[in-house]
Amino acid sequence: MPGVAMKKLIVMTIALAAFAALTGSIYAQDKSPLQLKEEEKAREAKQIDKEYKAAKKRENAAANPAAATDPWANMRGTDEPKAKR
């Protein structure tokens, strides 16, 4: 009789070890709350940076609307062509 009980104990121990190994790998695939929080912070920082760059671009475009004009247009004579190269 001691042999049957020992076999059951060994089988049960092996089954428990296999179950623990399988469930451990399943939980390893999920992200921890800390990882999720860090990813959310990274996404927010990226979005803020994108909005900042867009605002700076709009600000620069609004500050320099005359950048395309020719500042020397009034100084040239009328008989000279505008684009002389």
Image (cartoon, helix red, strand yellow):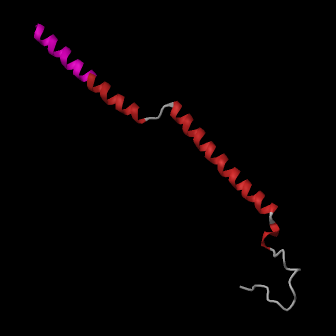
Inspect the magenta stretch and tell me whether residue 53 lies in it. no
Relative to the observer, which residue lies in front, 39 or 10? Answer: 39
Q: Residue at x 76, y 59 (%)?
A: 60
Residue 12: image quadrant is top left
- Dominant secondary structure of the magenta stretch? helix
Residue 11, given in percent of the width and then of the height, sits at 19, 20
Relative to the observer, which residue lies in front, 2 or 78? Answer: 78
Q: Locate residue 71 relative to residue 29 in the image: left or right.
A: right
Relative to the observer, which residue lies in front, 85 or 68? Answer: 85
Residue 58, given in percent of the width and then of the height, sits at 75, 59
Residue 71, given in percent of the width and then of the height, sits at 84, 74
Quarter of the C terminus within the rendering? bottom right
Q: Residue at x 16, y 11 (%)?
A: 5
In this view, the residue farthest toward the bottom is 79
Residue 33 against residue 53 in the figure, above or below: above
Quarter of the N terminus within the rendering? top left
In this view, the residue farthest toward the top is 2
What's drawn in magenta, residue-wise? Answer: 1-16
Q: Residue at x 53, y 31 (%)?
A: 34
Residue 56, given in percent of the width and then of the height, sits at 73, 54
Residue 19: image quadrant is top left
Residue 77 against residue 70 in the figure, above or below: below
Q: Residue at x 75, y 85 (%)?
A: 83
